[in-house]
Amino acid sequence: MLKRTIYIGNPSYLKLKDNQLKIEDALTKETKGSIPIEDIGFLVLDHYQITISHLLIVAMQQNNVAIISCDESHLPLGLMLPITGHVEHSERLKHQLNCSEPLKKQLWKQTVEAKIYQQKQVLRHQRLPFEPMLNYMNEVKSGDSTNMEGIAAQYYWKTLFDDFTRERKGDAPNNFLNFGYAVLRSMVARALVSSGLHPTIGLFHKNKYNAYCLADDIMEPYRPYVDLKVVQWMQNPQYSDILDKNAKAFLLQIATQDVTINGLQRPLLTALSITTSSLYKCFSGESRIVHYPMLS
C-alpha cells in the first residue's frame, strides 16, 4: 500500500485515538481530520503552534513513519526515524560497515552515472541541449575521480534555468529546490532504515558533521525528479516566487509520482525501497548493481 504524506501547516493538536492520527484545531478543539497510522509514510510539521502527543510519536515510530519538522523559513529542519526499521538490522549493519573501499567507489560511479543520465533527461524533457551530458556520463571513473558530477552540474544548471546560481539560500527557484530536496532526503533516509541500513555511513559523503551521508549519496539520482517538479511548478498558473502552501502541496506530490525502475512503473516511494534493498544486496555480496529509476 502506498504511504501518504501528511502536511500540517496550522496550529493543531495531534493525538492518537483508535490507532489513528487525530488532528484537532488548537483553539476550538474541533476534529479536522483522522488518518490511520498504517497509511502514513511522512508527517510534515510546519507551524510553531503544533502540539503532538508522545503516544502518537511512539505509534508512528512503530509504523516507520518519518516525522519532519520545519524551521522559521518553512524548510524541513529535523527528521525523526525509528532506531531500527528492519528485523535484521544488526546483521545488515555489519555488512554495511564492512563494505570495501573499491566497492564503495564502484557504487558511487554507478550513482553519479545515474544522476547525470537523469539530468540529461530533464534537459531533454524541456527541449534544451543535452548532448554534452552524454559525454560527461561516459567519462565517469571509479569513485568519480575526475569529478564529472560537478562538471555536469555546472552545465546542467546554466542550461536548465536562465541567469541562475544554485545556492542553499537564494532567490527562486532555490527555495523550491531546497524544500523538495529536504523532503526527498527524508524519504531516502526512511527507505534506508526500512532496509536495515544506517543513513549516516556513506559511500562518498563523509562529512563528520553530517548525520545523513548515505542518504545524501543515494538521493543524487532522485534529485532530477525534484528539479522537474520545480520546473512544472514554475509553469503552473498558481506560481509565485514565494514558497507558500500551494507550492508545498505541489512539491509534496513527489512521493507518489510514478517513476520507471527495472522496466516497471512504480511510485517514487516504492522505487526508493527497491533502490535501498538493492544497495543492501551489494553490501552483502549478492549483487554489484544498485537499481535506480530512469527518466523516460
Image (cartoon, rainbow, N blue to C red):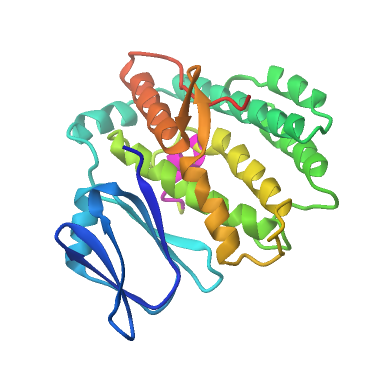
Q: Position of residue 265 (x, y in %)?
A: 48, 25
Q: Residue 133's image quarter?
A: top right
| Residue 147 seen in render | no
Residue 232 in the magenta stretch? The answer is no
Asked whether 76 or 265 is in front, the reply is: 265
**79 lies above or below 214:** below
**195 lies above or below 47:** above
Q: Main secondary structure of the magenta part?
A: helix
The quarter of the rendered structure image containing the N terminus is top left
In-image side of 50 versus 184 (left or right): left
> For the point 57% across and 54% down, which residue is it?
250
**147 lies above or below 278:** below
> For the point 55% across and 22% down, which residue is it?
110
Asked whether 138 or 22 is in front, the reply is: 22
In-image side of 34 versus 6 (left or right): left
Q: Residue 126's image quarter?
A: top right
Asked whether 183 or 12 is in front, the reply is: 12
> For the point 20% across and 29% down, which residue is it?
91
Q: Position of residue 6 (x, y in %)?
A: 39, 57
Residue with the most extreme bottom position: 27
Q: Position of residue 149 (x, y in %)?
A: 67, 33
Residue with the most extreme left position: 18
Q: Tell me the magenta residue range.
A: 210-218
The quarter of the rendered structure image containing the C terminus is top right
Q: How many marks?
A: 0
| Residue 257 seen in render | yes
Residue 212 in the magenta stretch? The answer is yes
**91 lies above or below 40:** above
> For the point 49% across and 70% down, which residue is it?
71
Q: Position of residue 36 (x, y in %)?
A: 24, 54
In-image side of 6 versus 142 (left or right): left
